[in-house]
Amino acid sequence: MPPSPATKLSRLKDTLQTHEPLPAKARVLSIDLGIRNLAFTLLTRPPSKAKDAKPAVHAWQRIELAPAAAKAVKVELSDDESTDSKTKLKLPAQDFSPTALSVIALRLVKDHLLPLEPTHVVIERQRFRSGGGAAVFEWTVRVNSLESMLYAVFATAKGLGHWNGTVDSVDPKRVGPFLLGEDGAEILSNEQPKSRSSVKDLKDKSKSVHDDEVLANSAVRTKKNSKENKKLKIDLLGKWFVEGTDVDIVGEEAKSTQEIFLKKWLPREKAVKGKKTKKDKQVSAPKTTDTMKKLDDVTDSLLQGVAWLRWQENRQTLLKEYADRLE
């Protein structure tokens, strides 16, 4: 059941009353968490309040954390360059014990993240179940463990006086609808796991359908909607780059990642639209699954950072315009 208007208003008041404006020199580090692939983006606020002012992207990378993933490379999106040891963190084969993960979390924060000097760290909130199932997969437990360890490492660094920033978590289901608008919200609403009552409703519409068939169809539909949502977000970021809007890529490594992103995204976009090259031959798109694996993580980390910055701006605007109503 959705919250009542009174509950929403109460939550809004609590959020705004505890809101702290971002400093002008805030450095926001957005992390899309994963054991096989972890992506991060470092952004700073627009230098001016002009309508066309854009946040600057100083770092944008994907790092391989597990050996079973595809070969890592310098900018983490290409597979034909030599690997830089500083951009690849390896675990012993199939070792996902707390001891091994804690070492990975410490090295990740100490060697890769803190050197970026972030003032605010935004971490993608991990789910405990997949597809609404009752079971909790072992891989989910591993990612959740890594998530907790990252929070612990940042808290320890702050407690020891080595860092003075803040850490916030973001529900990934809120980023898509916020940036994509109505289309994204509709897709994500269809992506929610089906409850028992939903299964019953479907059965009432078709008495001949068995429970397992309904659940199977629901799982297929959820997977399809999830892929569509990923595609929409990737396309949104691609259009930002092509049109030169919303973000300004300034870091050299970030520019390399952007270049590889466009190299992988543009052929697929042209193929989808049926565009043709100068030789009048239709451009063939890369395999969808491979493209998604390569672009999904880095896309999420950048969009998450942009969304978080806009949320802070929106809160500040609300505080200025409705401060008298919060008392």
Image: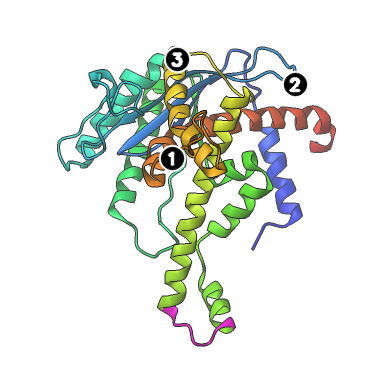
Please provide the residue range marked out in magenta: 205-211
**Tag in front: 3 or 2:** 2
How far, Cα to Cα, is label 1 from label 3?
42 Å
Give the residue displayed 35% in from the left and 22% down from the top: 75
Q: Residue furthest bottom?
A: 207
- Residue on which the image places disc 2: 51
- The kind of residue tagged 1 is Ser
Give the residue displayed 44% in from the left and 63% down from the top: 220
Question: Is 139 drawn above or below residue 147 in the view shown?
Answer: below
- The kind of residue tagged 3 is Glu
Secondary structure at numbered mark 3: loop
The reply to whether discs 3 and 2 touch (Cβ–Cβ < 8 Å) is no
Magenta stretch holds residue 67: no
- Going by the image, does 267 lie left or right of 90? right
- Quadrant into which the N terminus falls: bottom right
Q: State the image coordinates of residue 12 (x, y, percent, origin top left).
A: 71, 42
Main SS of residues in magenta: loop
How far, Cα to Cα, is label 3 from label 2?
27 Å
The answer to which quarter of the image holds residue 310 is top right
- Going by the image, does 100 lie left or right of 200? left
Q: Residues within 10 Å of mark 2 (few under 14, many from 20)?
A: few
Give the residue displayed 38% in from the left and 44% down from the top: 287
Q: Residues within 10 Å of mark 1 (few under 14, many from 20)?
A: some
Disc assigned to residue 284 = 1
**Tag in front: 1 or 3:** 1
**Tag in front: 1 or 2:** 1
- Residue on which the image places disc 3: 117
The reply to whether discs 1 and 2 touch (Cβ–Cβ < 8 Å) is no
